[in-house]
Amino acid sequence: MSASAPHHSPPDIREQLVRRFKAVLPAEQVLYSDEDLRPYECDGLSAYRKLPLAVVLPDTIEQVQTILKACSELDVPVVARGAGTGLSGGALPHEQGVLLSLARFNQILQVDPQQRIARVQPGVRNLAISEAVAQHGLYYAPDPSSQIACSIGGNVAENAGGVHCLKYGLTVHNIQQLKVVTIDGELLTIGGSGLDAAGYDLLALMTGSEGMLGVIVEVTVKLLPKPDRAQVILAAFDDVVKAGQAVGNIISAGIIPAGLEMMDKLAIQAAEDFVHAGYPVGAEAILLCELDGTNEEVSAHVYQVREILNHSGATEVRTASTDAERMNFWKGRKAAFPAVGRISPDYYCMDGTIPRKHLPEVLRKMAELSKEYDLPVANVFHAGDGNLHPLILYDANKPGELERTEEFGGKILELCVEVGGTITGEHGVGMEKINQMCVQFDALELTQFHAIKNAFDPNGLLNPGKAVPTLHRCAEFGAMHVHHGELPFPELDRF
Amino acid sequence: MADISEQLQQQVQSALENHQPLSIRGGNSKAFYGHAVSGTPLETGGHTGIVTYEPTELVLTARAGTPLEEIEQTLAEQGQMLAFEPPHFGAGATLGGTVACNLSGPRRATAGAARDFVLGCKLINGKGELLHFGGEVMKNVAGYDVSRLMAGALGTLGVLLEVSLKVLPRPEGEETLVQECSEESAIKRMNQWAQQSLPISATCYDGASLYVRLCGTEGTIAAARKLLGGEEVPPTRTWWHKLKEQQHAFFSSNKPLWRLSLASTTPPIPLKGKWLHEWGGAQRWLVTDEPAERIRKAAEKAGGHATLYRGERGNLDVFHPLPEGLMTLQHNLKQAFDPKGIFNPGRMYKTI
């Protein structure tokens, strides 16, 4: 078991760390007063907060190596942080650890339009890459909704997705090479300039490993040519089930839309009130279907998709005829989270993925749970790839409501696992979904994960306590994955 | 259709008890790939059957021993395909072997490799435990990506029992154009095309001619044909099939066959022998007598690696030797999955 946290008396170890960090970093890049640490106490999941012993802001790979070596020698946990926009608490600091911010690694090192790659530092914002290469007619495809702020290093650590995954894949499909520093301070180059590399696929293993295996200090991303044309169709439905079937019908017709998004009534209403995108507010669900490619292909597919939507029972089908109108259609969807934030003091965003055929059942059960917990839910859904983002509306100032929300959220994730899906499609496990990992995986599988962790970080210093729960924690949580009808974790005491 | 996972698990467990290495074998069509393994054969060819196939979800799950041909046939009936166009290299090719070798065909540069389409798997690890990772959904970031790690691991980390794959619709039409040109100009053209929104699904330069395959709607193909120019190759399907299965005349030599995977823009490499380019210049085949060291140095210089794909090995490594730090990680991972070293020992690297 590699996830046990080391114990030190904090002031003493803090002094040692700060002394060693200051030997390689300017004083203003080593933070340790409570006041300076405060901005780093949480990431995008602000319900969880902790102060680390120290925050370091290196700007060279050599400094990162020195920092990791020092932490390794002093047996101190390290949590890497990019832009801090993650939604699962993956960058939540460790109370006895160092928070390693990669924010100063913000340079685009190389753009090679011929080879269609960009070599960038991990702190570069996702959108900044596409902006920098736009002059060459290229872009970086994965576009998480936080793309204006989130960093590419964090994207790799979480295997970030976005609204175009069905056609263009996740982060793992769009990167070519990583430079990674191990907990021992060793610099490794993973991947290469070709489309594959010799040996085990460490590039795949590192992607989505949530800072548990190494610290990413450079990323080479693949760039794609911008499609000649993109067009969006908006369809309204008086029934979410019909909208779900329409998605299946489009895919059955051999069309892979660039984006295929669904919103339910509450989400439509909230978005419309906020950004006035002209959404049909009476509808039970809307679908946004973006088609891109060559001019001819888009023409043919727009025609086909409109036919399919009409045959699938859409009450209204609109095609954006200008780029401005297309942006307007998207505006409501992209603003869905803040829009929901306006109608409720707080909201909690979930991230399960399900096989799409189970959508009606999952939505029905979610509505039941919503009644049971007396908390409304708005649904936005990456319909093309089955990734659900239920937003639970709550008020953190009402005693007990956050706890009730978390329990409700947990139930939604368990429901996703029950129908053959997963607890997280793109936000990561982090701190947030650590208990639900016990539902998705059994003791043997979790043990295998720990063995992988051990292969990279035998002392469990990188982001301890995140992503993969200890068997002990699962036993405490009590929600067990019953495998082949056997009682799980028989080796552990019951709580 | 047969589920023999229990039997396979028992065989692994007894191999563990007897400290007996196992040589995992599906259809035995890719025995040439990697080093020979001395071990008791573990036959996965009997573990067959498509478990689930949901055309509207674009997902197929099948047991590892399922013939690739059966899978492709089933998909074709629904107008779908394995977009990485795996080579079979023999009638018995199975899904498990295809994923374990991570072999991909002409469409790789635009669609992705076998590993890109793997969504989940069931496997037996080196402790004889049956484990399930990933799933049947496109987006899944719960836990480390063990399923993709299995792709290309050549069975050295576990016995694949079941694999879930993303599948894609077949394009409405395809057409292949051919242009005569030099190697320099072929490299330049392939990379220039890749910077534009064009319906190109494959490219190949055989030393004299540059072949480019267009896929999509009729209108799309017509517009691209006009833009690119070139003569049409009549039986487009057959031509790319032969290339993928290495039945093209280029592959008939008795000399060692090397596969170089490198930056697509790499200029012609001054090594003696015959070259064939694929994947927009990112995969280059070389038939040569040049010493391994020179070939590997050239591949490294281009940010890539070189595999001795077919031919006499002697003492040579089939796969590109790794720097020490990466090699240590390979050992650690092998230890994490197969601590007793019973699965395909030496198939990939001599020490793992």
Image (tube, rainbow, N blue to C red):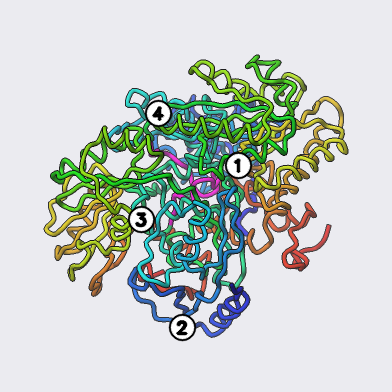
Residue A252 position, x and y percent, is 56, 45
Q: Which amino acid does label 3 sit on?
A: Gly
Query: What is the chain letter for disc 1?
Result: A
Query: What is the chain letter for disc 3?
Result: B
Residue marked by disc 3: B105
Residue marked by disc 2: B40
In terms of depth relative to the viewer, which is nearer, A309 or B98? Answer: A309
Q: Can residue A13 be seen in this view?
A: no
Q: Does the magenta stretch include residue B92?
A: no
Residue A232 position, x and y percent, is 53, 26
Asked if marks 1 and 2 fall on the same chain, the answer is no
Q: Is mark 4 on a helix, strand or loop?
A: helix
Q: Which residue is at the far bottom? A: B18
Residue marked by disc 4: A295
- Give the distance between the C-alpha atoms of the residues marked 1 and 2, in whole angstroms: 48 Å
Bin the neighbour count of mark 4 within 10 Å (Cα to Cα): few under 14, some 14-19, many 20 and up.
Answer: some
Discs 4, 3 touching: Cβ within 8 Å: no
Q: What residue type is labelled 1?
A: Asn
Is A105 situated above or below B154?
A: above
Residue marked by disc 1: A249
Asked if marks 2 and 4 fall on the same chain, the answer is no
